[in-house]
Image: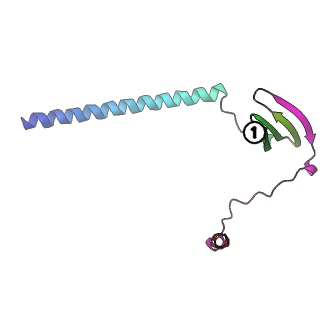
């Protein structure tokens, strides 16, 4: 009797493993085709080197002013929920850019500890 129970238990485990493998393969196929569909649909925008948002300022809920760099020109635009309005072109000299910290330089532990002790 104990042999039959252990045998059916092993068979049940094997069937459960096979069913999990089948579900896993079905999920992989679904993810593959969903990713291909998203790539073709244009929902995910490709990165560009000629257009970038430099700064965004929120004026009201769902209303923003953005400085956009297009090529070598800077343009101020108003962005709403359903519309985008051209405001003006900006000169690069009139903009103030904060220096971008170098991400490769990591501060030493001693510097971080000194900053924390000051606070």
Q: How is the image coloured?
A: rainbow
**Quadrant of the image containing the N terminus:** top left
Q: Which residues are magenta?
A: 82-111
Residue 94 is one of the magenta-drawn residues: yes
Residue at (68, 72) in percent of width and height: 118
Residue 107's x, y, as percent? 66, 67
Rendered-image quadrant of the C terminus: bottom right
Question: In the figure, 97 relative to 53: above or below?
Answer: below
In front of the other: 58 or 51: 58
Residue 24 figure quarter: top left
Work out whether residue 80 or residue 92 is closer to the camera in this orientation and state it: 80
In-front residue for pair 25/69: 69
Residue visible at 69% across and 33% down?
45
Crowdedness near tag 1: few (<14), some (14–19) or many (≥20) residues, C-alpha within 10 Å: few
Q: Quadrant of residue 43?
A: top right
On the image, the x and y values in percent for residue 19 come to: 32, 30
Count numbered badges in the picture. 1
Q: Secondary structure at mark 1?
A: loop
Direction from residue 69 to residue 114 in the image, left or right: left
Magenta stretch: includes residue 85: yes
**Mark 1 — residue?**
48
Q: Is residue 112 above or below residue 41?
A: below
Q: Position of residue 65 (x, y in %)?
A: 82, 39
Please give the name of the residue rendered at 62% of the width and 72% of the height, measured from the top-left corner.
113
């Amino acid at each position: 009797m104990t042999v039959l129970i252990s045998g059916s238990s092993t068979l049940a485990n094997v069937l459960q493993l096979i069913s999990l493998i089948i579900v896993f393969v079905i999920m992989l196929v679904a993810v593959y085709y969903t990713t291909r569909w998203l790539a073709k649909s244009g929902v995910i925008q490709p990165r560009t080197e000629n257009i970038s948002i430099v700064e965004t300022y929120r004026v009201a809920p769902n209303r923003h002013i953005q400085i956009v760099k297009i090529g070598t020109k800077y343009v101020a635009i108003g962005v709403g929920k359903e519309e985008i309005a051209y405001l003006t072109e900006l000169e690069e000299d009139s903009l103030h850019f904060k220096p971008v910290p170098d991400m490769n330089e990591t501060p030493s532990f001693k510097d971080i500890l000194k900053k924390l002790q000051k606070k």
